[in-house]
Amino acid sequence: MILEICQYGHPVLREKGVPVEAITPEIRQLAADMIETMYAANGVGLAAQQIGLAMRITVIDVAPSEIAWTGETTEGRALPMPLVLINPRLSDTTGEQAGEEGCLSIPAINAEIKRAEQVTVTATDLEGATLQFTCTGLLARAVQHELDHLNGVLFIDRMDAATRVSVAGKLKRMQKETLAELKKRKTALKG
Ligand code: ZN
């Protein structure tokens, strides 16, 4: 099922996710729906906050991309795509890369963002097993973007000051529109 993607201004995007305690059939279904939603929106990643749930689960697929990336599991296996990362954490962040970033929740804005070039990720997969991998390039960027979402952090928070100023008006408008839409729905439900 394709889920609705929460837009900038929705308060859930600023919430820290709670850990997923068990891999239930509901969690598996949620992951499947998030993957379907990500593909339908032509995204390379989607975090639970973006579909209205403050939980520590994200999906990523950079396989179709023409932008360079590498990633393999600690055992040297190729990473399964799409990736489902449950309760992920980062370690061994090294180097620096800068590249264009956008967000399915902030569709009108793209900006160059600095990220670590290489990161190691430890997460639980849908089988409940530990998945650990080290990655670079686009995949490392996607992982950092999505893990930020799980902490209520958005890529606009990582823009340099000048870029932030240049998009401030757009962001304000977007926030206003989202809040107006949420209010309208609330009223509709009451009526
Ligand atoms: Zn995003």
Image (cartoon, helix red, strand yellow):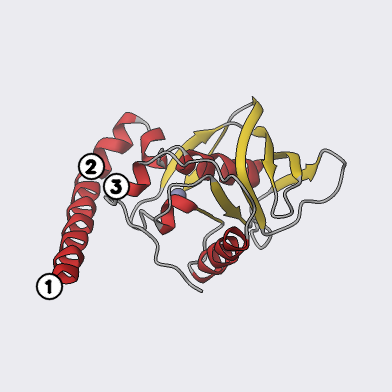
Q: Nearer the viewer, residue 11 or 76?
A: 11
What's the residue type where badge 2 is placed? Ala
Query: In percent of the image, x 75 and y 42: which residue is there?
Result: 130
Q: Residue at x 60, y 41 (%)?
A: 87
- How far apart are labels 1 and 3 at the CA level? 23 Å
Residue under label 1, please give it: 191
Residue nearer the viewer, 174 or 27: 27
Kind of residue at disc 3: Pro
User: On the picture, is 80 further left or further right than 105?
Assistant: right
Left or right of 105 on screen, residue 58: right
Residue type at mark 1 is: Gly
Between discs 1 and 2, the one toward the N terminus: 2
Label 1 crowd (10 A; few <14 / some 14-19 / many >=20): few
Residue at x 39%, y 66% (from the top left corner): 4
Badge 1 element: loop
Q: Is mark 3 within 8 Å of ligand 1?
A: no
Mark 1 or 3, closer to the camera: 1
Percent across and percent down for residue 149 are 46, 43
Nearer the N terminus, badge 1 or badge 3?
Answer: 3
Q: Secondary structure at mark 3?
A: helix
Q: Is residue 82 left or right of residue 146?
A: right
Residue ID at (20%, 63%): 181
| Disc 2 to disc 3: CB gap under 8 Å | no
The answer to whether mark 1 and mark 2 are in CB contact below 8 A is no
Q: Is residue 65 visible?
A: yes
Q: Which mark is residue 168?
A: 2
Quadrant in which residue 161 is drawn: top left
Residue 11 is labelled as 3
